[in-house]
Structures are given as structure tokens and as C-alpha cells.
Amino acid sequence: MKETNTSTLASIDEEHRDQLIESGTGDVEQVRPGRASSISRTMALLFAAACGMAVANIYYAHPLLDTLSGEFGIGHSRIGILITVTQISYALGLLLLVPLGDLLEQRRLIISHMLLSVLALVVVGCAATSTVLIAGIAAVGLLAVVTQTLVAFAAALAAPSERGRVIGLVTSGVVLGILLARVVAGLLTDLAGWRSVYLVSAAFMLLISGVLLRALPKVEREKTTLSYGELIRSVFLLFVQERMLRVRGVLAFFIFAVFSIFWSSLALPLSEPPLSLSHSAIGAFGLAGIAGALAAAKAGRLADRGRGQRTTGIALALLFLSWLPISLTRHSLWGLIVGVIILDFAVQAVHVTNQSMILGARPESRSRLTACYMIFYSLGSAIGSIASTAIYAYAGWSGVSILGASVSAVALLYWRLTRR
């Protein structure tokens, strides 16, 4: 019987194989009979909206640090711990929570994480002491990784011929969430105080949880004897076994280091003479980045057509070139706008292509592949941020521009050496 099932699976094309599972008895059962595995554009947009709301929760604090410092009596030299705690918690979530998507039913896992996020946001919004604030922020960061579970689930539901397009659309929601979080936090704080930021976010997270509960399909999972400990160990084994994951993970490290190098220090030259822009004006540059990020969503379609390597090379070259207009920031804000659009386009194009190529490697391990890949994202973001502010203090915006261009050049060289 087992041999018969093996030959049956081998004869099914890739598009239909993703919608089959093998039960514990060895019988092949169809999860969603009657049609090829795919999701509608409306469903993909729902995934994108949920991703954007979830990831925004870890960026709301960035423009609020000064306000939080005054309210909780945390010195300016120590208030940055809120960002550090958030990033560490997010990295832990990538390792400890995201792989559960390969073990548990993903719909239930996503809804559970979203509802727990609501509670964490309420804790932050109602925090009376710095201890409660930090604990709440840590929980928010830990649970924000539901974003990556959503991306992996969307990839699992999409037909192989459409996976890149769907991932591009869904991850555009992630970028929108990151870029708009600062703007939303600033507006709500001006209108109703900083606590409103987290309480309003909690309300929207509760609302989107209800929508997802009704809209997400329930997909049966293959029965497994894999324990949680074995699941986590397998994340590291995947890194050893999958060359594609290693190569694309390192590229993610480079591109998000560049992304962080730029955005972490941008406010510094813009707020100083001769520009001396206001906080709202500085935040508006994030809107320019949205144009580039949304345009890059189409990179997934190129990956679907087997042009992933070519797309990566072109995007990395653009990433390097973007630092020329960016370096002229003090002399031309129009040059900065052009640079922002190109940089965000390039980063998002490589990111979408990376995920499209990686998530097609092992359908049964998509959540673990996502977790491993995104750990590189976290490392690149953290190191890029630290390096950027340190270089700015030593060499100003010219030094930051040289650093960003140098890392971009290394990324392009690495892609060229590993392309095959």
C-alpha cells in the first residue's frame, strides 16, 4: 500500500501535490478537493493587512521614546532598551514560535497569537510602571512573529505558479506596516496621547482576528510524532542541508543591514541645520519609501517565471546605486526622495524573491524555513542600526553613505560569487 501511494504522489504535478497530505495510515487525502491550490486577490490582501497590523506593533515605540522616557522616568541613555527588548523578543519568537506552523494547524495558531497580541497591547497601553511597560513590550515583540506565520500560510495556500505573486502582495503589507507605524504613532499621540497608540492597535488586532477566524481555511495537517524539541533542532538542520536557504539568508542579512543603516540615522541629518525639519516632515519620507516597496511586489511574478536570480542581481545593483542620491541629502531633498524610492524598491525586490525561492524548496517545512530566513533579517537589522549610529557620530552622513554603499557592494559581490 505504501509503495502504491509513493508512485501516486510521484505522478501528481507540483501544483496539485501541495494540496495533498499523507495521513497517519498511509492513505493520501486531498485537503481542498475540486480545484488547484490558490488564494484570491481579496484573501491575499487580507493576509497583507493582517501582516501590516502585526508588524507595526514593534515599530510604534520608535517615535515615542522621548515621551516614554519622561512618563516613566527612564533616562535618555537607557530608554533605547525598549527597542532592544522588542528586537530580542522578536528574534526569540522567530526561533520558538514560527516553527510551530509546521506542527500545528496554522489557522488556529494564527488566531491564538493575534488574540494574545491584543492582551499584550492592552498591557502596554495601561502600563503604570516601567517594569510592566517593558514586560508588555517584550510580549508584543514575541507575538509579532505571527506576521511570518501568515506569510508561510499564504505561501502554502498559493499554487506554485502563483506563489511569488502572492508572497509579493502579502509582504508588501509588512513593508507598509513598518513604514506607516511611525506616522500613525505620531498622529495618535498628538490627538490622544501615547497610550492611545497601543489601545487603538489592540482594537484593530481584535477586529482583524475576527475577520481571519471567518475567512481563513482550515487545512488538515499530516500527523507526526515530531516533538517540539525536535522541531526546533530541525530549524538548524535545515540551514545545514539547504544551500538555497544559506545563500538567500546571507543576502537577507546584507539587504536588511543596508535598510537599517539608512533608516536608523536618517532623522539625524534631517533634524540638524541647515535642514532642521520637523518630526512630521521627517516621518513623511517614509511615505516615499512606500512607493518603491509596493512597486517591488511584482518581483514575485518574475520569480514565478524562473527569473529570480536575474531579479536579484538587478535589485542589488540598484541598491548600490541608490546611495549616490542619498549621499546628497544635505544638498537636495529631491535626491533623497529618489534614493529612498530606489533603496526600498531594491530591498523589497530581493526580499520577495528570496522568500519565493526558499518557500518552494520544502513545502512541509515552510514555517521553519521562514523562521530560519528571518533570523538573518533580525541580525542584519540589529547590526546595521548599531553600526549606522556609531558611524554617524564619527563621520556624519557621508560616513553612513559610504557604509551603506559598501555593504550593498559586498551583497552584490556575494550574489555574483554564489550564483548558480
Image (tube, helix red, strand yellow):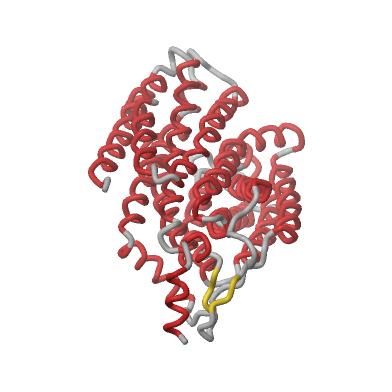
**Outermost residue to the left:** 417
Left or right of 367? Residue 209 is right
Answer with left or right where residue 74 lies relative to residue 259: right
Of residue 334 and residue 226, the one placed in the foreground of this image is 226
Q: Nearer the viewer, residue 10 or 295?
A: 10
What residue is shown at x 43% (from left), y 34% (from top)?
346
Frontmost residue, 64 versus 205: 205
Q: Number of marks in the image?
A: 0
Residue at 50 percent across and 36 percent down: it is: 296
Does residue 108 appear in the picture of this structure? Answer: no
Say which residue appears at 51% left-offset and 53% top-offset. Answer: 85
**Residue 415 found in image quarter:** top left
Residue 143 percent coordinates (x, y): 59, 58
- Closer to the camera in the image, 111 or 154: 154
Q: Percent position (x, y) of residue 99?
A: 49, 65
Q: Is residue 49 above or below residue 36?
A: above
With respect to residue 333, does 137 lie above or below?
A: below
Q: Position of residue 77 (x, y in %)?
A: 48, 40
Query: Is residue 283 at least partly visible in the picture?
Result: yes
Q: Is residue 300 above or below residue 90?
A: above
| Residue located at (62% from left, 47% from top) | 48
- From what the image shows, is residue 261 above or below residue 224? above
Provide residue 378's location: percent of width, then percent of height. Answer: 44, 50
Q: Is residue 18 left or right of residue 420?
A: right
